[in-house]
């Protein structure tokens, strides 16, 4: 009898990521990236953001097509609900980043994923953004992410993948740590 | 200018272990020491500090701890005494009170400049220890009036004002200093980043006994999956005593945990929201360590309770006196500012392969995970110095062949 092992395939090219890390060691400047979006006010609280170019690997880069994303506030705020709210985009970014990380870490650790789902929630006290209570912050008071993962791994291995994904997540870092933000008018 | 085959920079346990191995190979050398033998153990340790490794692990080539408490932990003066006794017994050619101010290529080898004259050497071994504290840039943003002390300058609680203390870093130093300050009556807030949680004792033995016995301490640098990560792991969260000092123990003693100290804005600290995850990472890593021990030794031991993480403040207003001082237990680095040889990466870190730099004849000793996990501890100096002395001898031999060829 021959035992064949199925290659682990989560659709992440870990080799390419590791190659990039090795290349960065030789040429640290190519690791300097810049992410971009532009936003145009449409009407009311509705805006449209476009994402097309970025900078990295010491050169200008473009996505294979441009993406257009609408943001708005919901009907309950007397708005038109033309898209998710900006704070929901933050949750979208966090969930997408952590989930991409889960796939990459699982691939690196040779663990086959069958399904990965997460629900995200963010608590917010509107006294903050409405200026009704100076002691309440504008942003989230707490963010929760709950993963359900089906994989060929022990519960601790799965927990370790999720923990490692957080450790290496750009958006998790952006959300949990301060960032210097410069907003100018030209 | 004096000429010698090898100059060893630093008369700590590593430099002296190297001296012993050079002497065994009849390589003439000097050990240049800025202060006294075991200088950092005399000048850069807090009063109550004890070694993290049990006494039986205090082993140097040709000298092993012989006291009556093999399972105890030496104090810093006792380590200094042990190392000084070793230097004397080895009759090591130590030149004390001589600070190396520059090492650069020169002649057939190196020129070593000191505050007491110049040396020429065919080979250099850097064994100057990790003497420089790494204090993050956020330290500069503390409001005036808050006392700020790096851990290597910390001695005892009396050095700090009464009132709240923020201890930054929860590895061995931070955890121990936090515990001591809390006991002194100063309410401690401990900012916790990535850390390595271990129990002091496991299945009836010291955790380091297990790591030694099952071969973890002998894992080699050139067989590591991720050497960068292994070399940058924080120190084991241990205290030199027969008890476990983890975040649960600290919280039970009244220490308040917060996330990594990330910034200060308008006089208010910003602590990272990653505390839950760094604790989860440490608990999972601990589980893997104990699983490895059990797998290699057979059987299974008890597991610790998961780290309890309560909701913690993300900011403390530093302007109202709640925090009177900050202790930075944020790591130490070697100081190679006097090394004028291009062996550094773009961020100024010394490049080496198991202690062998790319510059022929230049070696480094005494860095974490240099050639094996054991390298991090005093006990690592024996084998590391032996390996590098052998390499150094080969280098000298190769040089002789080359010189002979050039002459003929």
Image (cartoon, grey):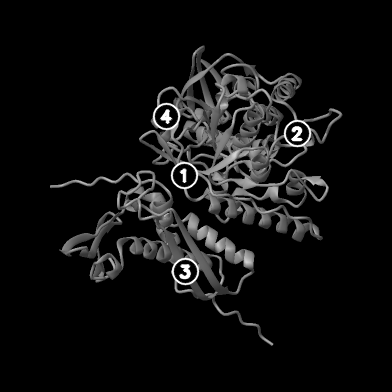
Give the residue at the far front of this rendering.
Answer: A132
Assign a secondary structure to mark 4. Answer: helix
**Secondary structure state at the residue bearing disc 1:** loop
Camera-near label (4 vs 3) is 4
In depth, the one of B205 and B33 nearer the eye is B205
Q: Toward which corner of the image does residue A4 lie, by quadrant?
A: bottom right
First in sequence: mark 1 vs mark 4: 1
Q: Nearer the viewer, residue B148 or A23?
A: B148
Judge if badges 1 and 4 mark residues of a common chain.
yes
Count the numbered circles shown: 4
- Asked if labels 2 and 1 touch by Cβ distance under 8 angstroms, the answer is no
Number of the label disc, if any, that sits on residue A119:
3
Q: CA distance from mark 1 to mark 3?
A: 24 Å
Circle 3: element type:
strand
Whole-angstrom CA distance, mark 4 to mark 2, is 49 Å
Closer to the N terminus: mark 1 or mark 2? 2
* Residue B118 can be seen, yes or no: yes
Are there few (<14), some (14-19), or many (20+) residues within 10 Å of tag 3? few
Q: Which residue is under mark 1?
A: B314
**Dot label at residue A41:** none
Mark 1–mark 4 Cα distance, whole angstroms, equals 16 Å
């Amino acid at each position: 009898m021959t035992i064949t092992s199925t290659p682990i395939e989560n659709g992440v090219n870990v080799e390419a990521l590791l190659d990039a890390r090795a290349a960065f060691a030789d040429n640290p400047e190519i690791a300097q990236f810049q992410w971009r979006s532009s936003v145009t006010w449409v009407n009311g609280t509705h805006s449209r953001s476009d994402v097309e170019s970025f900078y990295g690997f010491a050169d200008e880069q473009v996505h294979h097509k441009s993406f257009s994303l609408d943001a708005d506030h919901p009907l309950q705020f007397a708005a038109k609900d033309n898209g998710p709210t900006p704070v929901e985009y933050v949750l979208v970014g966090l969930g997408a980043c952590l989930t991409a990380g889960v796939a990459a870490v699982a691939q690196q650790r040779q663990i086959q994923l069958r399904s990965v789902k997460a629900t995200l929630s963010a608590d917010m006290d509107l006294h903050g953004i409405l200026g009704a209570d100076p002691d309440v912050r504008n942003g989230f008071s707490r963010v929760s992410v709950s993963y359900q993962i089906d994989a060929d791994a022990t519960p601790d291995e799965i927990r370790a993948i999720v923990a490692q994904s957080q450790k290496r997540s750009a958006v998790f870092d952006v959300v949990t740590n301060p960032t210097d933000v410069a907003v100018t008018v030209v | 200018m004096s000429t010698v085959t090898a100059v060893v920079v630093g008369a700590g346990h590593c430099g002296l272990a190297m001296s012993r191995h050079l002497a065994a190979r009849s390589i003439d050398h000097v050990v240049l020491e800025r202060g006294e033998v075991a200088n950092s153990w005399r000048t850069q340790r807090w009063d109550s500090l004890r070694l993290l490794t049990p006494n039986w692990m205090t082993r140097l080539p040709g000298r092993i701890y012989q006291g009556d408490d093999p399972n105890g932990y030496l104090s810093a003066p006792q380590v200094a005494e042990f190392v000084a006794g070793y230097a004397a017994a080895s009759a090591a050619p130590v030149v004390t009170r001589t600070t190396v101010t520059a090492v650069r290529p020169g002649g057939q080898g190196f020129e070593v400049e000191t505050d007491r004259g110049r040396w020429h050497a065919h080979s250099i071994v850097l064994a100057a220890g990790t003497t420089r504290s790494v204090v993050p840039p956020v330290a500069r943003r503390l409001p005036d009036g808050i006392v700020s002390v790096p851990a290597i300058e910390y001695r005892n609680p009396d050095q700090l004002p009464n009132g709240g203390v923020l201890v930054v870093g929860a590895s061995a130093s931070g955890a121990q200093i936090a515990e001591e300050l809390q006991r002194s009556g100063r309410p401690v807030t401990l900012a916790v980043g990535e850390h390595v949680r271990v129990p002091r004792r496991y299945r009836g033995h010291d955790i380091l006994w297990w790591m030694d016995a099952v071969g973890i301490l002998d894992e080699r640098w050139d067989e590591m999956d991720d050497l960068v990560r292994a070399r940058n792991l924080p120190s084991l969260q241990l205290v030199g005593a027969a008890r476990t000092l983890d975040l649960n123990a600290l919280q039970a003693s009244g220490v308040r945990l917060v996330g990594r100290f990330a910034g200060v804005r308008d006089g208010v600290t910003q602590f990272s929201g990653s505390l839950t995850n760094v604790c989860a990472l440490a608990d999972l890593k601990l589980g893997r360590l104990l699983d490895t021990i059990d797998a290699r030794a057979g059987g299974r031991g008890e597991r610790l309770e998961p780290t309890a993480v309560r909701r913690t403040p993300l900011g403390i207003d530093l302007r109202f006196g709640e925090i009177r001082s900050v202790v930075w237990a944020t790591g130490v680095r070697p100081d190679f500012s006097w090394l004028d040889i291009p062996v550094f990466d773009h961020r100024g870190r010394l490049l080496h392969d198991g202690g062998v730099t790319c510059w022929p004849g230049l070696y480094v000793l005494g860095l974490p995970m240099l050639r094996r996990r054991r390298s991090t501890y005093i006990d690592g100096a024996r084998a590391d110095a032996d390996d590098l002395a052998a390499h150094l001898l080969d280098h000298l031999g190769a040089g002789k062949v080359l010189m002979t060829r050039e002459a003929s």
